[in-house]
Image (cartoon, rainbow, N blue to C red):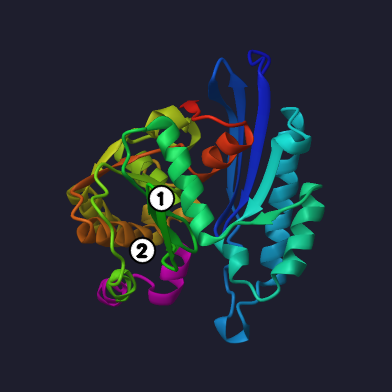
C-alpha cells in the first residue's frame, strides 16, 4: 500500500449477488489498480415477485454487514469525500421497498448511495472495459440479476442475471434457452465484434479455464483471456454433469458461485449465438472502473491492472 503515492478513488457496488469494492490510484495520466474485494451476499435470494419483489430482512442484513467491511477497506486506503462512490444496481431497481433498504445501506457505508438505471449500468461497464481494451466494439455485463449489452452510444438491460435465471429455471437447458431466446428476440445490435465480457460469471469462467486458484486471484491473471463459444459450451456441460460438491472442487470455482454458474454461462452462450460472436475477450475492468474513470475527471483514462 505504501508504494502508491497518487490520489486514490474508491467505488462500492451492491449488486443482486455480491458486494464489490475497488480502489484505484490516479497518477501519471492513468488509473492504476490498488485493491479490491468481492463478497457474495445474495441480496435478492428468496425475494418474492408476488409480494412486489420484497427483499428478505436477513439478505439485507447480510449485505449491510459486507458494506461495513467494504467501508473499512476504503477507510484503510484513505478514500474519502467525493473520491468515494457508492451505488447499487439491479437489486434495488426492482425492489418494492428500495428506499428502506437504501437507508440501511447508507448507514452501513457512512454516506449516500445511488441506484444506477439499466442504461447507466451498461454505459459504465462499456467505459470501464474500453479503459483497458479500447478496441472493444461491444460489451456485455452479466451480473446476478441482469444482463447489460452495450456498444458506442447504445445500451440495453435485460432481466437475465445468473441468480435470477437459476432461481426461475434451475438448470433446465430447454426452458432456459427458450426464455433467454424470447427475451433477446427483439434486441437489435450492429456488429459487436470484438466483444468484451465483464461480470462475475465471465470472471469465474476465465479463472477455471486458466486454472487460477481462487486464493491466487489477481486481476491481471485473467484479464484479456479469450474465451471461445466452444470452450464455454464444453465447460458448462462438464459443470452441469457434476454435483454441487463436485463443482466446488473445480480449480478456480468460488464455492458460492457453484450453483449459479451454469445458468449464467448459458446466458452468455445464447448471447454469443445471437450476435454471431465465436469468441469474446474477458475484462477485469468493468462497471466499477467506468464509474471511477468518470469520477477521476474529464478525459479518457487508461487502466493499469
Residue at the (58%, 61%) spot, across then down: 42
Residue 142 lies, with reference to residue 24, above or below; the image says below
User: Which residue is identified by label 1?
Assistant: 153
In the image, taking residue 179 as reference, residue 294 lies left or right, namely right
What residue is drawn where x is 36% and y is 54%? 246
Residue range of the region highlighted in magenta in the rendering = 163-178
Q: Which callout, 1 or 2, points to the residue nearer the camera? A: 1
**Spatial CA span between label 1 and label 2:** 29 Å
Q: Quadrant of residue 182?
A: bottom left
Callout 2: few (<14), some (14-19), or many (20+) C-alpha neighbours within 10 Å?
A: many
Q: In this view of the protein, can residue 184 be seen by the observer?
A: yes
x and y percentages locating residue 91 in the rendered image: 59, 64
* Camera-side residue of 87 and 211: 87
Under circle 1, the secondary element is loop
Q: Toward the viewer: 174 or 102?
A: 102
Q: Return the residue at label 2.
A: 263
Q: Is residue 135 left or right of residue 29?
A: left
Give the answer, above or below, for where 151 lies relative to 77. Answer: below
Q: Position of residue 142 (x, y in %)?
A: 42, 55
Q: Main secondary structure of the magenta part?
A: helix
Whether residue 240 is situated above or below residue 252 in the rendered picture: below
Q: Is residue 13 magenta?
A: no
Amino acid at each position: 500500500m505504501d508504494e502508491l503515492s497518487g490520489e486514490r478513488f474508491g467505488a462500492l457496488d451492491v449488486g443482486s449477488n455480491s458486494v464489490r469494492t475497488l480502489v484505484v490510484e490516479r497518477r501519471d495520466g492513468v488509473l492504476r489498480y490498488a485493491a479490491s474485494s468481492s463478497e457474495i451476499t445474495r441480496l435478492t435470494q428468496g425475494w418474492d415477485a408476488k409480494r412486489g419483489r420484497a427483499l428478505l430482512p436477513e439478505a439485507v442484513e447480510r449485505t449491510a454487514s459486507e458494506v461495513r467491511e467494504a467501508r473499512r477497506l476504503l477507510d484503510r486506503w484513505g478514500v474519502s469525500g467525493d473520491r468515494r462512490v457508492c451505488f447499487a444496481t439491479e437489486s434495488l431497481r426492482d425492489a418494492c421497498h428500495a428506499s428502506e433498504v437504501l437507508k440501511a445501506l447508507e448507514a452501513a457505508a457512512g454516506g449516500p448511495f445511488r441506484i444506477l438505471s439499466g442504461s447507466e449500468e451498461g454505459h459504465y461497464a462499456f467505459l470501464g472495459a474500453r479503459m483497458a481494451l479500447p478496441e472493444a466494439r461491444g460489451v456485455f455485463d452479466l451480473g446476478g440479476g441482469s444482463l447489460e449489452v452495450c456498444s458506442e452510444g447504445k445500451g440495453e438491460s435485460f432481466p437475465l442475471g445468473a441468480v435470477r435465471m437459476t432461481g426461475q429455471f434451475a438448470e433446465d437447458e430447454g426452458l432456459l434457452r427458450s426464455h433467454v431466446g424470447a427475451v433477446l428476440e427483439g434486441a437489435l445490435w450492429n456488429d459487436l465484434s470484438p466483444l468484451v465480457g465483464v461480470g462475475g460469471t465471465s470472471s469465474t469462467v476465465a479463472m477455471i479455464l486458466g486454472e487460477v486458484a481462487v486464493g491466487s486471484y489477481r486481476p491481471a491473471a485473467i484479464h484479456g483471456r479469450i474465451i471461445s463459444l466452444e470452450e464455454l459450451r464444453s465447460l458448462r456441460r462438464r459443470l452441469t454433469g457434476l454435483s454441487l460438491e463436485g463443482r466446488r472442487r473445480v480449480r478456480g470455482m468460488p464455492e458460492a458461485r457453484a450453483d449459479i454458474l451454469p445458468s449464467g454461462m448459458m446466458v452468455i452462450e445464447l448471447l454469443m449465438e445471437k450476435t454471431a460472436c465465436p469468441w469474446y475477450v474477458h475484462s477485469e475492468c468493468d462497471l466499477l472502473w467506468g464509474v471511477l474513470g468518470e469520477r477521476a475527471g474529464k478525459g479518457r483514462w487508461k487502466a493499469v491492472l
